[in-house]
Image (cartoon, coloured by chain):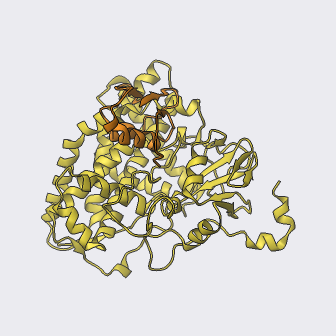
Amino acid sequence: MKVTVDQESCVASGQCVMTAADVFDQRDEDGIVELLEDQPTEDRAEDVRQAAALCPARAIRVEGQSGFVR
Amino acid sequence: MTSTLGSADANAAEVPEYPMSRAEGCPFDPPPQLRTMQREAPLRRVRLWDGSTPWLVTRYDEQRALLADSRISSDPTNPGYPAPAPVSDEHSEGSPVSFILMDDPEHARLRRMVTAPFTIKRVEAMRPFVQRIVDERIDEMLTADGPVDLVEAFALPVPSLVICQLLGVPYADHDFFQRNSKVIVHRDSTTEQRNAALGALAEYLDGLVGRKLTDPGEDLLSDLAARVESGELPRREASRMGVLLLIAGHETTANMIALGTLALLEHPRQLAELREAGDDSELVASTVEELLRYLHITHNGRRRVALEDVEIADEVIRAGEGVIVPNDIGNRDPDAFAEPDRLDIRRDARHHMAFGFGVHQCLGQPLARMELRVVYSTLYRRIPTLRLATDRENISFKHDGSVYGVYELPVTW
């Protein structure tokens, strides 16, 4: 799976870091998302999809998404 | 045009008034009329105090879609905005509205100035401090013999102490700012009362910002003062942001602590499970999410207005029409949460909308979550016999507040 983030749209809610801290991080100065791993392994897929679904700014895109997570 | 509604009396009569009342004896549930409306359609019109008939959106998917839609504005100066109160003097001097009532890009610019202390890392670093406050407050409660009011002794001081530390506000002034924020969030406060309270808090925060200009500390008001110094931020805006964060930082969490305790006391089997859970267990985390979903204390309905025509669920919200999104009923949508009216601390409720959705979603949520995790994992473990010191019928609920909760919660052990 391939993950991309949009730092312009991000509102620093921190939901992604709470859900998958090994894939997403936050900039110290304003909490905006930083991607630690743009090709997470398949065993991280569920959490990464959950993070994308929870993002209030819809700033996370996941390609190779096989299932819908709310 | 809304005249089609006004022209047909039969139709006009069918438009329900908003806000609605909760059912007697069901203090944790949203108004039953909202449930009926949700069953009937994802959105329909309601009538407000001023006779206007904005859209009320009741289903989870449509609520999320609209809150995340940039054609839907949060700015009350746009015509058609569904104001919650008769005289909405939101832009008066000293108003704390700041960026929560703005749209991007200005909203994003200001919001990003205050997000740094709320990153997951910074919030986790505050955990030992929060744990210490929680333990100290419990120690003090336990020195009392008789019943105590959990709100006064615990639920209010804990988040107040935390937000004071984060902002750099002296806790010694808590009587002053708690009294004023109570007036601001009280639904029945007159405009004069609310403006006076806002003015007092704005003046107070302005004084603090002034002090941080010359004598900065390690806190958010000092960060804002530095931005004032560099010309990035008008001093008046810095004070407004301070007022906003101070109020938002303690009113909400305080109500979640007290109302959450009442809800758990009424579900003793689940409370026992929680008590047995370790400090940082998944059960503590899921309890926080479930109580946020189930109690949904910000019960006024989020207010928006369409800037363009928006098609949704076979309806068209026209440009200039108001939109109200009561996330309390969205959090009880059976299509999003199985058996939504059942409290179940083991369910995965992370997709709830207690913090809203879209670009305005609560920026303090990591802090609120951490505080609630520490509280829920400590209070009932340290006072395992905690129980109500009055009959449930004697507890009065904040039906009249923009933040829901209990006024007092007499407990003993």
Colour used to depict chain A in the structure image: orange
- Residue B264 vs residue B115, the one in the foreground: B264
- Residue depicted at 31% across the width and 38% down the height: A43
- Residue extending farthest to the top is B230
- Residue B213 vs residue B154, the one in the foreground: B154
- Residue depicted at 48% across the width and 58% down the height: B336
Residue B247, percent from left and from top:
42, 48
Report whether A11 appears left or right of B269: right
Chain in yellow colour: B
- Say which quarter of the image contains residue B206: top left
Report whether B187 appears left or right of B245: right
- Residue B14 vs residue A21, the one in the foreground: A21
Above or below residue B114? Residue B77 is below
Residue B2, percent from left and from top:
81, 57
Residue B199, percent from left and from top:
51, 45
Report whether B157 appears left or right of B292: left
- Say which quarter of the image contains residue B87: bottom right
Q: Quadrant of the C terminus of chain B?
A: bottom left
- Say which quarter of the image contains residue A46: top left
- Residue depicted at 48% across the width and 59% down the height: B331
Give the mark count: 0
Residue B163, percent from left and from top:
33, 44
- Residue depicted at 49% across the width and 62% down the height: B401
Residue B163 appears anywhere in the view: yes
